[in-house]
Amino acid sequence: MPCAQAAVREPAADPLLTLRARPRRIALVGNANVGKSVLFGRLTGQYAVVSNYPGTTVAVTTGRAIVGGQVCELIDTPGVTALEGVLSEDERVARRMLDGGEADVVIQVSDARNLRRALMLTSQLAPIGRPMVLVLNMADEARAHGIVIDAAGLSARLGIPVIETVATEGRGVGDLRDAIARAAVPSFGGARRRDHARLAHDLAVEYRRHRPRSAARLQERIGRWVREPVTGLPILALVLYGMYLAVGVFGAQTLVGLIEGGLFEQLVNPGATALVNRLVPWAVVRAFLVGEYGVITMGLTYAIAIVLPVVATFFFVFGFLEDSGYIPRLAIFSDRIFRTMGLNGKAVLPMVLGLGCDTMATMTTRILGTPKERLIAVLLLALGIPCSAQLATILGILGGVSFFALVTLFGVVLVQMFLVGFLAARTIPGERSEFIMELPPIRWPQFGNIVRKTLLRVRWYLGEAVPLFLIGTALLFVLDRLGLLAELTAAAEPVVGGLLGLPRDAAGVFVMGFLRRDYGAAGLFQLAKAGELDGVQAVVALTVMTLFVPCVANFLMMVKEQGMKAALGILGAVTVIALATGTVLNAVLRGLHVSF
Amino acid sequence: MSASEKTRRLSNLAPGASGRVVRVMRENPDRADRLMALGVTPGATVTVLQRFPGVVFLCDHTELAVEPAVARAIVIEVE
């Protein structure tokens, strides 16, 4: 058997570029947040989304790389903390991949500052018996911390190449390419009796030296300021205010004003209308393109002019926060609150990510420890977390009403999330896991990475959301033509007009809201601009819309992560809660004669 | 002086204090495994950074945040 394996791995004589029936597979394995995806990008030239917190990569990604004149398949995997013992979903996936012999070479990527932890994993990888390379990434940060690792000595001891890299700057990546050809099955067999901790500790003591180092770097001081309550809470307030200024004022008002008010209202829509009227003889088609529910005048205008500017601004600011290492530190402040909701502080990650996109965040719930936590997190994301596209329309509408209106909306939504979480924690069977979380170092975000991430996400928004906007508009057009929209509006009147106190037209907006709630909210934006909504109506309508399930894509992701039954349950519960909350809110605001 | 006189729970250390991990109480085996995987193993040096609203400590060069119950399970020998 060893012969057969050796035959597969043996490099061919020496042609410049060897192609095999099945390319050599190289897997990147390692702890979370050590830079696997950055290395993946460096080796393949493909961009994988990278951030400064654990759990950015939630699925196995593959790409092509040329290593030593051979086309290889590179496999990027989610981070693991262990490969033995109680394993998470991701760890089981990694373990199966390694045991199944899917990887011909394993590159273990590690954070050079955490040699002990890296070696614990090496000790678990070694017995699997695949050829390995150990990468000590972030070598620059380790050096700044006064850590010196005897890579040559360690390499001799382990029997595998040990390479130091700074993946974000591409340093050491050439050495790594060369080393892959020298990948070897570790000569040490890992720890005896699974005592990986002892072995790792002894090896780390032997091959690592600490140099005295200068005073704390600025990054560490910032790290302290943001996690200590006295300074951390004011900083949080500043960060939120900064986001409001960037996204709510600059994105939702300045940019939308320019693009929607300027470009679309002055040029695109009149131009398109004139062109269509001249070229298209059929009234139905004209209406379909540029009428009240026209694909261009409504669908495209909503998607490109109202939502896109805010989404893009948000993704940019958000990318900055992601890469700085700030977001995981919010877990320290929120742990207590999340614990009363059957979660722990770690849940802050999917919740904050949900502000970008609830669909993606629903997938990120995999980083949570137990099935109960994942279910509660998926429910809360669907219920209360407005995604960037929806924040866009909320800020666009309420920014023009009053600050107090915004506070009311977010206050109601937060209280509702807390209540639902509190009840869910007590009714859903299962346990929560304890809060144990690694805080990534504070880093200066790289401008290039933020721009790339933003562009990738904007492209994703265009591909994902815009078609739905257009389909939704077409659906409304058909409903309107068939007279069904009027019937639907009449049927919804008792709820929309009676309970929620909204104008009749809002019914159509809620139909859109079922497809994508930001699309529905964009409809509200138009209603508000036409002066058909007063302050209270705007707040009530937006609150209901925010509490709806975000979009069709989010629903499909819920089905994928939690199964059809749970997804339908969440959909039903969320819809009822949304309408009930709107009813109560309307009654209270009217009863108290509040005007915003 | 016996070792037991110098051992404390991580939850009882003041910010700034440091010591070596002696053991992690195993009343919750999952917890011990997770801590171990993050490098909190016997012999590791830890320094408490803050205690409120959650316990944050440095283990090697990793900053870890844990809830109080977890900090109570980590037994430290103070230097």
Image (tube, rainbow, N blue to C red):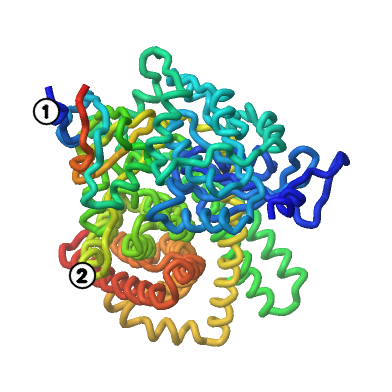
Q: Secondary structure under badge 2?
A: helix
- Of A165 and A494, which appears nearest the observer? A165
Which numbered circle lies on residue A69? none
- Of A307 and A165, which appears nearest the observer? A165
Image quarter (top left, top right, bottom left or bottom right) of the C terminus of chain A: bottom left
Instruction: Please tell me whether mark 2 or mark 1 is closer to you in this view.
Output: 1
Q: Is residue A6 above or below residue B16?
A: below
Do the residues under discs 2 and 1 have CB atoms within 8 angstroms? no
Host chain of mark 2? A
Position of residue A73 in the picture relative to residue A587 (left or right): right
Position of residue A515 in the picture relative to residue B45 (left or right): right
Host chain of mark 1? B
Q: Residue at x 14, y 31 (%)?
A: B4
Q: Is residue A250 visible?
A: no
Q: x, y percentage for residue A364?
A: 44, 55
Position of residue A94 in the picture relative to residue A1 (left or right): left
Name the residue beneath numbered marker 1: B5
Name the residue beneath numbered marker 2: A587
Quarter holding residue A572: bottom left
Number of labels in the image equals: 2
Image quarter (top left, top right, bottom left or bottom right) of the N terminus of chain A: bottom right
Residue type at tag 1: Glu
